[in-house]
Amino acid sequence: MPAAHRPGLRVDAALTIPEAELGWRFSRSSGPGGQGVNTADSRVELVWDVAASAVLSPAQRERLVERLGNRLVGGVLTIAASEHRAQLRNRDAARARLADVVAEALRPPSPPRRPTKPSRGAKERRLDAKKRRTDVKRLRRPPQD
């Protein structure tokens, strides 16, 4: 649904998904409801074809496919929202969820942990504390004959 006030879905400062690449499907929500439960198509599915997207660089596409591999079906990412009664609120929820999922998947991996070892002073302090604790517990024991 391209609109003048929504030029696209802004994921971060560098990436905006155009509205033309987003597809919508609507269906009836599951669960309990009132009079309008059988007539209102308030469940929303937002569909975005990651593999065919023109706004992604090859590196971004590769990272998305790698990180979202279990959520992609044929290179297509589907986000469903049915927590609200109104279709418009579910649309907004689906857009926000898609932006969050894509931003999290595009975030560069954290640097690997550099292994460290405790300093000599830290080892000595730890052993001294253990000795003090041992002495405290030894003094609590009943006297030996």
Image: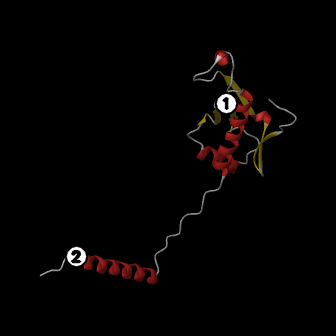
Residue assigned mark 1: 84
Is residue 14 or residue 10 the one in the foreground? 10
Measured Cα–Cα span from mark 1 to mark 2:
65 Å
Marks 1 and 2, the one that precedes in the sequence: 1
127 relative to 105, above or below: below
Query: Which quadrant holds the N terminus?
Result: top right
Residue assigned mark 2: 141
Residue type, numbered disc 1: His
| Residue 100, numbered label | none
Estimate the x, y position of residue 129 in percent, counting from the top left.
Answer: 38, 79
Estimate the x, y position of residue 117 in percent, counting from the top left.
Answer: 46, 75
Could you tell whether 97 is left or right of 55 in the image? left
Is residue 2 or residue 84 the one in the foreground? 84
Residue drawn at (45%, 80%) of the image: 122
Tell which tag, 1 or 2, sits nearer the viewer: 2
Label 2's element?
loop
Label 2: how many Cα within 10 Å (few below 14, some 14–19, many 20+): few
134 relative to 30, above or below: below
- Looking at the rendering, which quadrant does residue 27 occupy? top right
Could you tell whether 14 is left or right of 36 in the image? right
Label 1's element?
loop
Residue drawn at (64%, 34%) of the image: 78
Residue drawn at (61%, 33%) of the image: 74
